[in-house]
Image: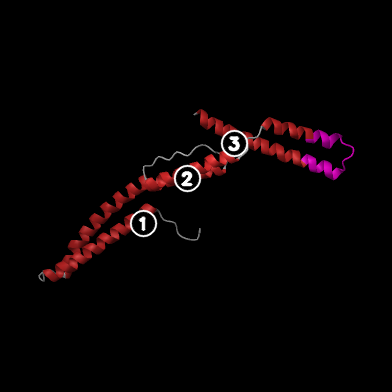
Amino acid sequence: MKNKREISLALVVALYSAVVIALGMAAYAVYQYIATPDKTVLGLVFEHSWHVIVLGLLIYATLYAVLYEKVVRPIRDLKLKLYAITRGNLTSIEIDSNVVEITEIAEGVQLLLDEMDRSVPHVSLTALSNCTQKIRSIAKESEALDTAAKDFLMNLSNVIDKMVRELSVAKGKKQESVAE
């Protein structure tokens, strides 16, 4: 997917609009040439190319600005928020757009976030930390365990500690966003 050249939606719409204007003016020039035989082809090309250039640039600039503000920027904002979600920031999605399709996508992502929050069991981080301490003490004191079992228990406690740290960070971010 990265092999394709990426271009902005605003650019595509604006360019196609300019092309349609050019084709319309060319068709009108052909009609005018047929209807008024006293005009030369070069005169008609010059006369209509000026209109095509001016109208094309005006419509291009207007469409590009409007589409960038109304469509492209909100989609980029949504993409940044989705990236933040992958990094553990599970705060709610707020997109500043009045475009129906974009707000529907944002609402769908918010619904997904809400469901994720409900489906993840709320774990007591203190209880997890206490479990890792208990696992470590068993691994250190137990004479009945061989070295492989002790290493396994120590690794398990390290994994749980890492999860506790990550959950603490994610929980802290979520509480910060709620407080704001």
Residue of label 2: 108
SS for tag 1?
helix
Residue of label 3: 170
SS for tag 3?
helix
Question: Does the magenta segment cover residue 65?
Answer: no
For the residues marked 2 and 3, what is the alpha-carbon distance in whole angstroms?
A: 22 Å
Q: What is the three-letter code of the residue carrying label 3?
A: Ala
Question: Does the magenta segment cover residue 137?
Answer: yes
Q: What is the three-letter code of the residue carrying label 2?
A: Gly
The magenta segment is 135-154
Closer to the chain start, of discs 2 and 3, is 2
Within-10-Å neighbours for mark 2: few <14, some 14–19, many 20+: few
Residue of label 1: 12
Left or right: 39 in relation to 140: left
Pointer 1 with pointer 2, Cβ within 8 A? no
Closer to the chain start, of discs 1 and 2, is 1
Query: Residue at 70% of width from left, 31% of height from top?
Result: 127
Within-10-Å neighbours for mark 1: few <14, some 14–19, many 20+: some
1 vs 2, front mark? 2
Left or right: 69 in relation to 6: left
2 vs 3, front mark? 2
Q: Where residue 71 appears, x then y in whole percent?
A: 38, 47
In this view, the residue in front, 117 or 74, is 117
